Amino acid sequence: MIDFTPEDRTGRRVLFTPGPLTTTRTVKEAMLADIGSWDSDCVRLVAEIREALVQLAGGGRDHTCTPIQGSGSYAVEAILGSAVPRGGKLLILSNGAYGRRAQLSAQALGIEHAVLEDPEDVPHDPARVGEALDRDPKVTHVFCVHCETTSGVLNPLREVGLEVERRGRRFLADAISSFGAYPAGPGQPIDLGAGPVDHMAVSANKCIEGVPGFAIVISRRDAMERTAGNARSLCLDLHGQWSHFEKTGQFRYTPPTHVLLAFRQALRELADEGGIPARARRYAESHRALVEGMRRLGFRAYVPPERQSHVITTFHFPGQDFDFKGFYGALHAKGFIIYPGKLTAVPTFRIATIGSIAREEVEALLRAIEETGMAPGAPRP
Ligand SMILES: Cc1ncc(COP(=O)(O)O)c(C=O)c1O
């Protein structure tokens, strides 16, 4: 549901960022209730959320869902620290900040790992992943980010998973910025059966359009059972938290009650919108409007269109002397929040097109960019 009206914009920030992102008024209002953490209210709420997420992911009775307090990185770290057994070896596919962060987690956890690196604007090549696995029979698990939010490049998660499956290794996926933005299910971009994906990381504050406060792991039940005793951490013990949910329906430690209430509302609004396919269409349309508008204003996208997600788009600075701070500040003053680039080498900035953003707001952002007088293709004011 889009709650945009021109009056609403007064004093409101529209976040063109990859999360936290713009949420509806009704999602925020859902937090105006207090519920007891051990109470049946919370147990029912958690059960509803866990069930809905497995369904949205295209999973069935063989799948299960484990919410975890914290941000997306906590889910990734819980997965790596719990799925890879002592003596196992992880292959991390990396073409941006989130592949690099997985590497830092593996280092911190003392997990033996190798990294297969690609440039930040190049998706991973499934055949190369297969070759790397053939070269290194010690690798037991492969980790792949779906949408690398650093640049917006979309990795072929499903096709990489099929290569992993062919070699009998286990597959771990980060769909943190893409879950909710791309269809999930057999043959779809997010396909739990391709790999098959043992565990997939998701976040509350991305494309389901909830608020920040917990992360989610969607797992195969048999893979989850195999994680028992593997964890290198008490709080991020995936099996510890999952088995507690299965026994009691509760979080082990203080649950983010208000955030869960907001998330349930966000799930209901996703269903009202027409589910993930409808949301994917809205995001794709916003992305198209943004890229066309930015091209008209003289900005160049960093990632070629055929590799580009509709989650976030990276634009080159239009010149060496581009004053990004001034540009950012001028947009901020009008209530639009964009994002600096996180790329290692190339000077860029990023604009996300996820969240509760209507087409009118994309158009309004483009007008605001034109009015900065800093767009190379726009007339100077
Ligand atoms: C693909 C991906 N993985 C991991 C993360 C890390 O999530 P967080 O910053 O919420 O810890 C992000 C955050 O944007 C992401 O986009």
Image (tube, grey):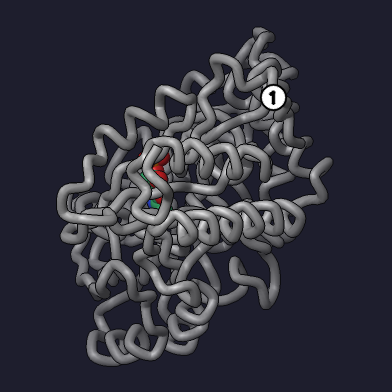
In this image, 299 relative to 94: left or right? right
Q: Is residue 165 visible?
A: yes
| Position of the N terminus by quadrant | top right
In this rendered view, identify the residue nearer to me: 128 or 218. 128
Q: Is residue 230 visible?
A: no
Q: Amino acid at mark 1?
A: Pro
Query: How many numbered marks appear?
Result: 1
Neighbour tally class for label 1: few under 14, some 14-19, many 20 plus, Cα within 10 Å: few
- For label 1, the SS is helix
Seen at 67% across and 28% down, the residue is 24
Seen at 30% across and 39% down, the residue is 233
Please provide percent x and percent y for residue 131. 31, 91
Q: Which residue is identified by label 1?
A: 6
As displayed, is residue 303 above or below residue 310?
A: below
Please provide percent x and percent y for residue 226. 47, 60
Please provide percent x and percent y for residue 376. 34, 53
As displayed, is residue 206 above or below residue 104?
A: above
Seen at 51% across and 63% down, the residue is 309
Label 1 CB sits under 8 Å from any ligand 1 atom = no
In this image, 90 relative to 10: left or right? left
Please provide percent x and percent y for residue 4. 71, 29
As displayed, is residue 377 above or below residue 129?
A: above
| Position of the C terminus by quadrant | top left
As displayed, is residue 269 above or below residue 108?
A: above
In this rendered view, identify the residue nearer to me: 267 or 152. 152
Q: Quadrant of residue 280?
A: bottom right
Seen at 60% across and 70% down, the residue is 189
In this rendered view, identify the residue nearer to me: 39 or 369. 369
Q: Quadrant of residue 211?
A: top right
In this image, 22 relative to 305: left or right? right
